[in-house]
């Protein structure tokens, strides 16, 4: 009898990578994720290769860098020629099921002009069986709230602050909780549905992709999560003394600071100017963001407990990660579309249930890993073939305490900031450039970080001396050799990883030869 094959692939949304108490965060406590780390492996230098949501999930699910899948904005179609983890696990007899969302925009070619699938970027990745899709589950959740007596119009005000709530004087606006209780929240609703599904499938092999919305904005959370962290204990963001001084670093940063100073640009129902808000409001907003993480941490704890109670824990590969990070006020910015580390540094926790992973339980991997590594890792664990398209590599050797040969020495990120209907800074108008000029690529090593724009000035940071990325050294003649070295490394990376599905196949007198590295 073959060993059971069960995969629980959990993704949160917009989680800063350092916000785990297992990493020594000075404030945030994540007991359930810490327990999972204690029985698995924490990848402590893990980066998404692209932001925002849709592009990040496209890379996670296809194993492709942005330069190869080219779905660079929320709403940019994902080319149907690319396979993905759902398609691949179907080949080995599993039915991949999605509870949540992948923010995938379909390839419009071959679809009628009025196809409803072309009216939303929040579509599902092809290949998944839909258990509960995000737009629908929001409706189901809101209907559940109404049935319980909550009164609101719809999505536009379901996250409103509780009316008539009197907050203490030493708390800011984001201390005010949601109108709904924690037991009725969207996070709890999702966890309940997934727990029911796991129980129903306990005697089967399965692949479940569970996606939680939080801690994605709006930055508001139900009681008691709103009060978990005292704003007086919350550190202020990394930033220069004024928005004007910060903006001088780069025109791209200036454009984002200007955008975020506009009302309701990032965090709905928030009366504060996100750039100039008082320190109390800033600390409170960060405290609330941390509380949102605890709600997800508790939900993950419930999922793990369900696996244990149903006898599935020791048969299940558990993956916890997210799509991208969050600036949380650093550099006077919020969100995830800047070149700073908090946009791209994200958590990755993997629990391999097999006995040959026992020696690495509780270990922290210090090597650079990337979101494109998830698809090949999951397929490798399942014994499935890893497609030639994958830019990432399997992390399986790390579970046995080994570092794969020729492992990467830097993390690689990209960002497409052309205009579109689903957010951003309207890059063409902001900088007087063409859509295809709205590109940046990032090479992030242990000391040096290089940011290259297609047409805007580059940046260079010395992360040993300047971990907050406050001082751009790109124009300093003394750092010209480092600039050249980093630019050459970036070019080499792009040459090695450009489209390569057929490049190691050769047709000749002996027929088709496959010379792909094994």
Image (cartoon, rainbow, N blue to C red):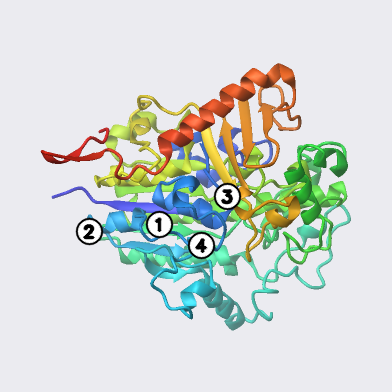
Q: Which mark sits nearer the N-terminus, 3 or 2? A: 3
* Disc 4, SS: loop
Q: Which residue is mark 1?
A: 306
Q: Which residue is mark 4?
A: 103
* Disc 1, SS: helix
The correct choice, above or below, for 516 with respect to 269 in the image is above
Q: Which residue is mark 2?
A: 93
Q: Which mark sits nearer the N-terminus, 2 or 1? A: 2
Residue at 49 percent across and 47 percent down: it is 66
Residue at 59 percent across and 47 percent down: it is 415
User: Where in the figure is residue 278, as x and y percent of width and height?
Assistant: 88, 50
The CA span between labels 3 and 2 is 32 Å
* Disc 3, SS: loop
Quarter residue 244 falls in: top right
- Judging depth in this view, the residue of 444 and 129 nearest the camera is 444
Q: Which mark sits nearer the N-terminus, 4 or 1? A: 4
> Which disc is residue 51 wearing?
3
The CA span between labels 3 and 4 is 12 Å
Q: Do the numbered discs 4 and 2 sit on residues whose CB atoms are within 8 Å?
A: no
Residue 417, can we see it?
yes
The CA span between labels 2 and 1 is 24 Å
Question: Residue extending furthest left?
Answer: 510
Circle 4 packing at 10 Å, graded few (<14), some (14-19), many (20+), is: many
Residue 368, can we see it?
no
* Disc 2, SS: loop
């Amino acid at each position: 009898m073959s060993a059971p094959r069960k995969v629980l692939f959990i993704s949160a949304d917009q989680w800063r990578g350092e916000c785990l108490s297992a990493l020594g965060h000075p404030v945030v406590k994540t007991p359930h994720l810490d327990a999972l780390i204690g029985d698995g492996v924490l990848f402590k230098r893990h980066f998404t290769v692209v932001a925002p949501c849709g592009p990040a999930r496209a890379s996670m699910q296809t194993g492709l860098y942005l330069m190869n899948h080219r779905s660079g904005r929320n709403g940019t179609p994902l080319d149907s020629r690319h396979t993905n983890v759902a398609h691949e696990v179907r080949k080995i007899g599993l039915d991949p099921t999605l509870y949540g969302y992948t923010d995938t925009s379909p390839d419009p070619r071959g679809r009628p002009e009025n196809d409803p699938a072309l009216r939303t970027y929040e579509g599902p990745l092809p290949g998944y069986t839909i258990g509960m899709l995000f737009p629908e589950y929001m409706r189901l959740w809101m209907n559940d709230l109404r049935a319980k007596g909550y009164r609101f119009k719809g999505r536009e005000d379901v996250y409103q602050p509780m009316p008539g709530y009197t907050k203490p004087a030493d708390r800011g606006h984001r201390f005010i909780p949601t109108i709904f209780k924690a037991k009725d929240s969207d996070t709890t609703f999702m966890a309940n549905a997934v727990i029911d599904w796991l129980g129903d499938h306990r005697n089967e092999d399965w692949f479940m992709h569970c996606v939680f919305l939080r801690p994605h904005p709006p930055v508001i959370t139900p009681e008691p999560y709103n009060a978990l962290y005292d704003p007086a204990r919350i550190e202020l963001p990394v930033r220069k003394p004024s928005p004007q001084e910060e903006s001088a670093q780069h025109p791209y940063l200036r454009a984002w600071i200007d955008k975020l100073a506009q009302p309701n640009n990032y965090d709905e129902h928030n009366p504060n100017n996100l750039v100039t808000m008082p320190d109390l409001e800033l600390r409170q907003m960060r405290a609330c963001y941390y509380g949102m993480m605890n709600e997800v941490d508790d939900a993950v704890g419930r999922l793990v407990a369900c696996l244990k109670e149903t006898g599935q824990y020791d048969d299940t590969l558990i993956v916890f990660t997210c799509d991208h990070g969050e600036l949380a006020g650093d550099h006077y910015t919020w969100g995830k579309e800047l070149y700073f580390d908090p946009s791209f540094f994200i958590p990755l926790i993997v629990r391999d249930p097999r006995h040959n992973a026992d020696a690495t339980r509780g270990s922290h991997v210090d090597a650079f890993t990337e979101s494109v590594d998830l698809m090949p890792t999951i397929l490798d664990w399942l014994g499935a073939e890893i497609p030639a398209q994958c830019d990432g590599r399997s992390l399986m050797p790390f579970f046995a305490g080994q570092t794969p040969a020729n492992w990467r020495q830097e993390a690689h990120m990209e960002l497409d900031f052309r205009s579109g209907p689903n957010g951003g800074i309207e890059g063409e108008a902001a900088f007087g450039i063409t859509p295809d000029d709205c590109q940046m690529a990032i090479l992030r090593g242990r000391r040096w970080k290089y940011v290259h724009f297609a047409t805007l000035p580059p940046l260079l940071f010395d992360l040993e001396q300047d971990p907050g990325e406050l001082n751009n050294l790109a124009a300093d003649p003394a750092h010209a050799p480092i600039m050249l070295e980093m630019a050459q490394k970036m070019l080499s990376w792009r040459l090695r990883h450009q489209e390569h599905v057929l490049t190691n196949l050769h047709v000749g007198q002996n027929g088709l030869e496959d010379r792909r590295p094994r």
